[in-house]
Amino acid sequence: MAELTAKGRATRARILAVAADLVLKQGVAGTQIEDVRRAAGVSGSQMTHYFRDKRTLIKDVIAWQADKMQRLHQTPELGELDSYAAWRRWADLVVERQTARDFQGGCDFGSLAGQLVESDADTRADLAAGYERWLELFRRGLEAMRARGELREDADPDALAQSLLAALQGGLLLSQTLRRVEPLRNSLNAVLTYLGSYADPGRRPA
Amino acid sequence: MAELTAKGRATRARILAVAADLVLKQGVAGTQIEDVRRAAGVSGSQMTHYFRDKRTLIKDVIAWQADKMQRLHQTPELGELDSYAAWRRWADLVVERQTARDFQGGCDFGSLAGQLVESDADTRADLAAGYERWLELFRRGLEAMRARGELREDADPDALAQSLLAALQGGLLLSQTLRRVEPLRNSLNAVLTYLGSYADPGRRPA
């Protein structure tokens, strides 16, 4: 795909965005290449030009959602996720975003993991890479907090990043399935309270 | 199915167990009726007799896994999940069980939710009912702890049950995708520490 023109890149990006949206609403199994082609308003030959088959398309949707997760977490509002206030805003934003769409689709990235993790080794590796990038982003924020003394020395940024991401993923899956906000809100509240328990007693969290 | 003989019920149960196992290893989309028939060693007409089509089979697999989750949580070892010690044993058992199978398949029930939640309204309702039973089981244990004064009065058994189940589901999905134990262990450890923060200060947790 190195030789795509600007117009070609735009078309490809548009097809991917449409595919990601359909997959979120209907699931991977419920989304066919033909649905995507129609929703994106492109011809069959254009579709084949950009995405050889469903497998290629889904692989690119995974990468697209992993990139989007990074961008969503790197807004001025959240900063570097390196303060208690930023983590609280993060939780509020997640809850707002999911409530606005009635919990349909669940986590944009995690729902792909839940559907595809056992499909084949390649796909699992792509999903694992997405989660590792996400954990790294969390860990960097937590490390900065520890470096500034906002988290005690005995706080383990790796373990905390995993607990935060797990609470998010589980809360999203429960709220998606039950179509109500409480599991997500309570799960995030629990893990943020746990994070707060590592506040350096010599300092006041923001 | 009200008229099945004892032998019929046993055959049906065997097919379901085989189907549940295949679905766990290969995913719902990757498991065809014919795979299940062959693995269970039954004829095509037997298969059709017990399960009209894949949709019926998957519906019964969901119910079967929901029942199994209940049984797994109601062993003498775990009691009524109504003490800190019982919750710690629960976490240890989950970690052991998943480690023994190299995290393949993830949560027996949650992996079905992750794959099928957006497939259709009926299936989502079945999955939601399974999670509600599971939450109810957790809540009963937590309510007993509060009634005995092992959890403070301000502890909310509903919210705690949701946080515990979310930490489990998220930890399992991360460990399943990353094929390593740490996310599951750290997620459970975080939520149990959070639970412990509701210990009545006038009492020592077991």
Image (spheres, coloured by chain):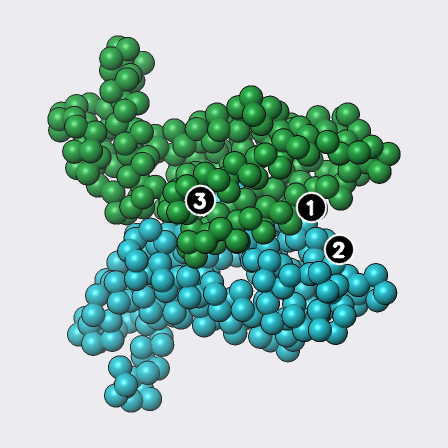
Chain colours: A cyan, B green
Identify the residue shown where x is 62% and y is 37%.
B88
Residue B97 located left or right of residue A19: right
The amino acid sitting under disc 3 is Thr
Determine which residue is flagged by label 2: A197
Residue at 45% x, 61% y: name it. Answer: A109
Cβ atoms under marks 2 and 1 closer than 8 Å: yes
Residue B22, given in percent of the width and then of the height, sits at: 28, 39
Query: Looking at the picture, does residue A163 appear above or below residue A174?
Result: below
Q: For marks 2 and 1, give the CA distance.
A: 10 Å
Q: Secondary structure at mark 1?
A: helix
- Alpha-carbon span between mark 1 and mark 3: 22 Å
Q: Position of residue A73 (x, y in %)?
A: 57, 70
Residue A1 in view, yes or no: yes
Give the residue displayed 53% in from the left and 23% down from the top: B75
Q: Which residue is mark 1?
A: B193
CA gap between label 2 and label 3 equals: 29 Å
- Which residue type does callout 1 highlight? Thr
Q: Between A176 and B62, which is closer to the camera in this rendering?
A: B62
Do marks 2 and 3 share a subunit? Answer: no
Q: Is residue B165 above or below residue A124?
A: above
Task: Point out the tag, 1 or 3, that comes first from the N-terminus.
Answer: 3
Task: Return the residue at label 3.
Answer: B99
Viewer-nearest residue: A105 or B77: B77
Density class for disc 3 (Cα within 10 Å; few <14, some 14-19, many ≥20) is some
Q: Label 3 near label 2: C-beta < 8 Å?
A: no
In the rendered structure, which amino acid carries the disc numbered 2? Ser
- Asked if the residue at tag 3 contacts the one at tag 1, i.e. Cβ–Cβ closer than 8 Å, the answer is no
Front disc: 1 or 3: 3
SS type, badge 3: helix
Instruction: Report x, y in % for residue B145.
Output: 72, 29
- Does the rendering let one see residue B48? no
Query: Please, what secondary structure does the residue beneath circle 2 have?
Result: loop
